[in-house]
Amino acid sequence: MRDQPAPQFHQSASRPITRRTFLKRAATVGLSLPVLSPLLAACARVEETTAPAGPGASPIPTAAVEPGATPTGPVEAPRSGGTVRHLIYEDPDTLNFIIGGTSIGRQIYQTLVEGLVGVDPEGNFYPILAAEIPTRENGGISEDFLTVTWKLKPGVRWSDGAPFTSADVLFTYEAATSADSIIADRFSKIERIEAPDDYTVVIRYSEIDVGYLEQWRATYGSGIIPKHATGPIAEITRWEWNRKPIGTGPFKLEEWVSGDHVTVVRNEYYHEEGKPLLDRIDFLIVPSEEARAQMMLRGDAEIMLWPGETYTEDFERSGIVTVGLAPGVWNTRLWMNLSQPRDGNPGPEPPHWLFGDLRVRQAISMAINRERIVNEVLEGRVALVTTPFPLGWYACELPPYQYDPNKAKALMEEAGWVEGPDGLRVARGARYAPDGTRAEVGLSTYSAFLPMELTALAIQEDLKKIGVKVNISIEDFAVIFGGWEDGAPRKTGDFDLLLYDTSIGGIEPHLIIRNTWHSANIPSATNPGGANYTRFTNPEADRLIDAAGSTLDIDARRDLYCQLAKIDREVLPIIYLYQFNEGNAYSRRLKGYVVSTWEWSTWDAKEWYLGE
Amino acid sequence: MLPYICRRLLQAVPLLLLVSLAVFLLLHVAPGGPMAAYERRMIGLSPQDLERARKQLGLDDPIHVQYVKWLARVVRGDLGESLMTRRPVRTEILERLPRTFYLMGTAFLVTLALAIPIGLIAAVRQYSLFDHTVTTIAFMGQSIPIYWLGLILILIFYGTLTNPFTGRPLFPPGGMATLGAEFSILDRLWHLVLPVTMLSFSWIAWYSRYLRASMLEVIHQDYVRTARAKGLREQVVILRHAFPNAAIPLVTLMALDLPLLFSGALFTEVIFSWPGMGRLFYDAAERRDYPLLMSIIMITSVLIVLSNLLADVLYAFLDPRIRYQR
């Protein structure tokens, strides 16, 4: 009885239709859609201007792309007023960078708080809250390099009108070295800090501190924070200031609705006449990348951070949005574990069964076809890199890597890895592996980032050609970058190959160089924060690093770092592949914006204005 | 009934304790941790700095100590502090909760308003064009990946179509209201359209099919035939006699969905930039913000237990044939 239609006791106009009939009719409608849809599309707005992209907007990275390429187009007279909408993908968490903070928070912070100095797109320091950069010539730096005297810019006011004085600098130092601070270490060489008057700060160091300028820059630190508007240092995690910072910057924070947006408005007390030009900046929190891209294309936002290649093309074609590129400090590297993994010992001994042998590492390096990765796999959107230091005052050029798979194979044979019957190499007389061991290794990289996955696949192919089998595992971001207690493989030394992009750390590289190459910084239970993941141990390298950290002589330091780079190339714990071009997408209406490798996107926000 | 409810509530306590232990262990044993954010995003931190950060976050203690500390705080009502923002968890949740409630509540009402008539009519006019259309669309609604649907909605209704009167996109790309504009009900409704569509699409599919099946069962019962035989109008037969009985299972289904009003819809809130509970959970999970995660999960668990109880009680209340033993 169930397979018949329900008894129709009511007067209904509809006849029962069988399912078959229905589906037939649906198919008819479906097939007619290709005819209907162009008609529908004509109703929708589809004008895409085909204005050719200006020369400054080329996505092809060349050495000629200067850091901070300005957008082309007629230069208009700067005008005051207007709102810029800046798209960010997550909430800033906290705006107190002494106790925490993220890179998204930095974009906002840089409009609010300043340091004593900043760095321009060419990589040179310039004074902001300081009257001038202290040097030996102007008496700012003492003969023995251990005393630095800062003269502060007079007449500066905080965004609430209170005057800025040396007491604020002293307070900043106290807060930054307090128990809850996570940026304390960079001030560890300061022995004494005094303020003889309202506009002078004298700092005495216990030993030469190469970070004497960088530690007072807001970009990776806290900048100068106000004594009167914060609170007791013991309660630093509970300051209201953390949600609403008061600073000397061109803007001040008006409103922060968690998860939705942050609004900053002009700081009337800003110490530069006539600046900032804009009235306000709205930081809109839009987690979906697709939604952000659509907003840019529709003119509902003026800046979008780090669009992937997916959108760069669309932006270029639209004529509404430009992608400003600058060579980035983010380098993709292949890290080889020099020590034995999964032996319960995070230290450099015993050597890795495969990568412990230098010849094998050389073979791996020669087997990887970098040109193909850069030009074909990643379609020329990245630039080749042959050195750990490609940018900045410490840039050190090294000869290009050799690509020679045949020589690679010969090296493997020489190292005691002979070709097995299935093409996979097997140990026979290898230095650190018993006979019969198969040359099969794991490679980990992080997920949700296409370039990493494509690079991993390319490397897998290249190494297969020389008889090394690579098993790729794509891990969650938090796994790759986890801490020692989380058992992150790169910390405990339980990996073979790691692939990810990393940064040198901006204009003052010493900290990260020390972390990465010094043997004292191999992660262990006693040093869980160490970053020498490859377990690279070289006494000469240690000596060079220590020497570079003990002098302020830029040329001497450059030379020392270059020697380190050469040793690194000889020992080959890390293979450098390519560097990303840092880029932000911005509307053609946004003028005065210059992309800088060394600073965050809002570093020149006071110069921004809107044109046509 | 009352002893039954008491018994259920008492049973819930050890259950929730077990859930808290299991979730805590899983979160901490899973690879990755809150330090990843520091290691990666805050370049320029020395090993010593990272050490301090870790101690500060209370990640130094062994795991069982961390659990006991957490439990001791929770029973006193202190949900702890978010690792990332350092604000009390309670503040974070209370800030986001109304927004999710507003979104999910609206979607829920829209769903009911549409699903009930659709399910009803589809059952009454079984195998009609209406019924077939609705069933097919419902099937699609349950099969289409919701994330894809959201992106398509943005692409079409914001990215492509334009309002002919204003020259601006037809619908906004997300958010709750237009920034900087005066408060206006119309503006709020305009922002609700796309996310509510995305949410209710599969919800309506679910409910209407359920109601339809339930109605079909009831329509064929003897007492319905009796009512017709007595000469009652068809409308009265359907609405006064058939529908209330068919709706009982649906009501219990709705009760089970109530926790969603708290926990929100993750994908919808991410795609449409809705600053609600779903987003909070998503952000917290990404950054392994343990205190926040534990609190959200435990509150959701409590709500699920309670809503299950509510569903059972409602069922007994509405259907006199059901009675629970002591």
Image: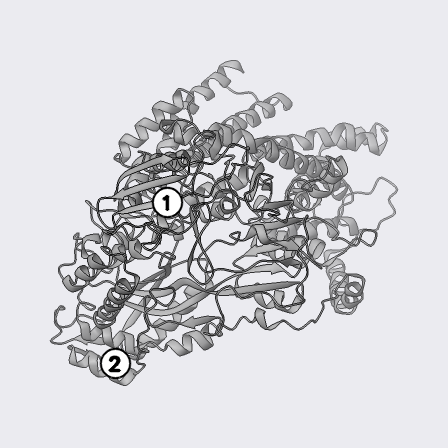
Q: Is residue A497 left or right of residue B177?
A: left
Residue displayed at 36% across by 75% down? A461
Quadrant location of the N terminus of chain B in the rendered image: top right
Residue B287 seen anywhere in this rendered image of the structure:
yes
Residue A440 percent location from the top left of the image? 25, 69
Q: Which residue is mark 1?
A: A150
Q: Amino acid at mark 2?
A: Ala
Asked whether, in this view, residue B305 is left or right of residue B170, the answer is: left
Q: Secondary structure at mark 1?
A: strand
Dot placed on the residue nearer the N-terminal end, 2 or 1? 1
User: As rendered, which of A215 and A341 lies closer to the eye?
Assistant: A215
Mark 1: which amino acid?
A: Trp
- The residue where tag 2 is placed is A408
Asked which secondary structure carries label 2, the reply is helix
Q: Is residue A110 left or right of residue B157?
A: left
Q: Nearest to the eye among marks 2 and 1: give it.
A: 1
Q: Position of residue B193 (x, y in %)?
A: 71, 44
Give neighbour class at mark 2: few <14, some 14-19, many 20+ (Cα, 10 Å).
Answer: many
Residue in the foreground of this view, choosing between A541 and B166 = A541
Label count reads: 2
Q: Position of residue A530 (x, y in %)?
A: 25, 51
Q: Is residue A439 left or right of residue A195?
A: left
The residue marked by circle 2 belongs to what chain?
A
Q: Chain of mark 1?
A: A
- Residue depicted at 28% across the width and 42% down the height: B51
Give how far apart the Cα atoms at labels 2 and 1 are: 55 Å
Q: Do tag 2 and tag 1 residues touch (Cβ < 8 Å)?
A: no
Q: Residue at x 50, y 38 (%)?
A: A247
Residue A367 or residue B255, whichever sits in front:
A367
Q: Is residue A188 in view?
A: no
